Image: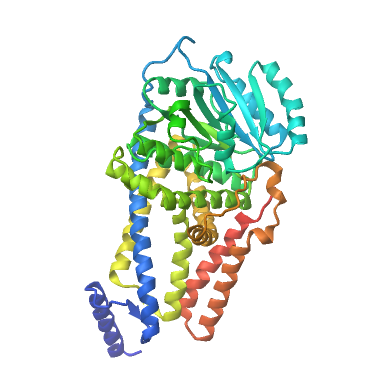
Amino acid sequence: MNINNYIEIKELTKEVIQQYLMNQYPWGIITRPLTPVAMAILSITYAITVAMLVLSLIQISVFVRYGITSLRYLKTHGRIDNSRIIDSTHGLPFVSVLIPIKNEDILTVKRSIRNMAVLNYPRNLFEVLFISDDPEYYVNSLVREIIPLADKLGINVRVIRREVNKGYKGGALNYGIKYAKGSVIAVFDVDTVVPSDYLIKAVNALLSGYDTVTGVWKGYYTSNTVVSKLLKFIYDVYNEVFFRGRFLSGSFPALTGNNIVIWRNVLESVGGFCECTGEDLDITIRLRAKGYRVGLIDSDVYVEVPQTYLALKKQYSRWLFSSIWNFKHNLRLLLSSKDMTIWEKVDGILWMLQLPSLSFAALSILITVILSVIGILVPPMPILLLETLNAITVLSLAMVLWSISRRVGYSTRDFLINTARSALLAMIMSFPMLIYSVESLITDEWEWIPTPKGYSTYRYPILRGLVHELSITLMLAAVMVILILNDQLIFMFYIADILAILLYGFSLVIPRR
């Protein structure tokens, strides 16, 4: 190449960049002419891209705000004001603790009873009801095992069997309430571990004016796997943003089904729990729509994290369906409420779209494939600007999460490793989440499966569990071959990079003890 050709290419490149910055390339910088069909496809693709980037920018910006609020709390070692602390049993209400169970190991139920026994609430003022959907023979064997343990520990425990298994978790809770004696209802999962002061703080908050309360939940694991350690980090750090930061910012106060304490008359006034898959989000919306106060107590609770990717996938698919179900059925109630602020309503919508947004990574990859096939080298200026703003906001959120992780006991090395792994896990999971999101929009019928815990995690066939992930991997490999055959080497490298990341990510998702 002589000097004149070099100068000519340099000037042409400079001119193209200037025109691009002035937004004179409505379709972006392209490598070949666009056909009418290609332009129609691009119109749809760019519309989806803009909507995705705008929603992502809003969500991440909100998380940054919540993260800063939570970080301020952690730095000052502040405590949520529970007003006066009750020192005597006089005036304390009777509490019925409801714990729905199904296909649970007896050892897990025993562990739950031992945890209930550490509560410093007066023993004569609370009871524990396990509501079981299991066969009669199993319930009988459960009773023989756990009642002697409960008697030894000095707590009142009953096991109630539902003969008709319907209404999901909400149906089990409503059934259990019929047998509950308490004026206060507490709801825990069987793997929930609460501190000894949880119940006294929760009741104190109710007596101080709240109608229902919950606590921030963190993670623990019973089997040391790559996924379980990663999920413990995610729950310990991210939930400081998603829950504590959200509550302390006066935003949508999402109750979590693994720990809810509520006045019985308040619960009955909204018709009890919804017999649907998303009873915790549904009850939050119905309570706030009637102006009831939802509070956060200053006691963290712990729940067992899934041990494998397949177990996590089942859990998140159920949560995602619950979010979309509530979006379809409770959006009008949320927006029409006169007792919620405008921001609380907006944040409620963001909460419902939080899990479906996990599919954005898959959408981004599919959009990259479409643009590569059409020949788009650089997208239009507005889209590139939105992508840049998202990147800056993600970096800000990463800095906040790093600060939070240091406050809750993780080193910088732990943060970097777990952040990279969580991004990789989210990328892989985004493909089934995209498919589940579409399915959830179409139908209300969904198979409700409790999150596999313990050794039951390993009972699920690997290949069938990874069908979505393997399918997208094969599709990307096919696209890469097509691009190579058509001498589209630049775009081929785009796809090859994505494929390499996915293949590396399979080291996380293959179940191992």
- Is residue 423 left or right of 380 when viewed as pictured? right
> Which of the two residues, 101 or 70, is positioned nearer the viewer here?
101
Q: Which residue appears at 35% of the width and 28% of the height? A: 76
Within the image, what quadrant is residue 164 found in? top right
Question: Height in image: 267 above or below 479?
Answer: above
Q: Position of residue 325 (x, y in %)?
A: 47, 51
> Which of the two residues, 310 or 186, is positioned nearer the viewer here?
186
> Which of the two residues, 218 or 493, is positioned nearer the viewer here?
218
Q: Quadrant of the N terminus?
A: bottom left
Within the image, what quadrant is residue 156 found in? top right
Q: Position of residue 122 (x, y in %)?
A: 55, 14
Q: Position of residue 330 (x, y in %)?
A: 41, 47
Q: Which residue appears at 53% of the width and 36% of the height? A: 258
Q: Which residue appears at 66% of the width and 30% of the height? A: 160
Q: Is residue 299 visible?
A: no
Q: Position of residue 405 (x, y in %)?
A: 45, 40
Q: Which residue appears at 31% of the width and 58% of the height? A: 389
Within the image, what quadrant is residue 485 found in? bottom right
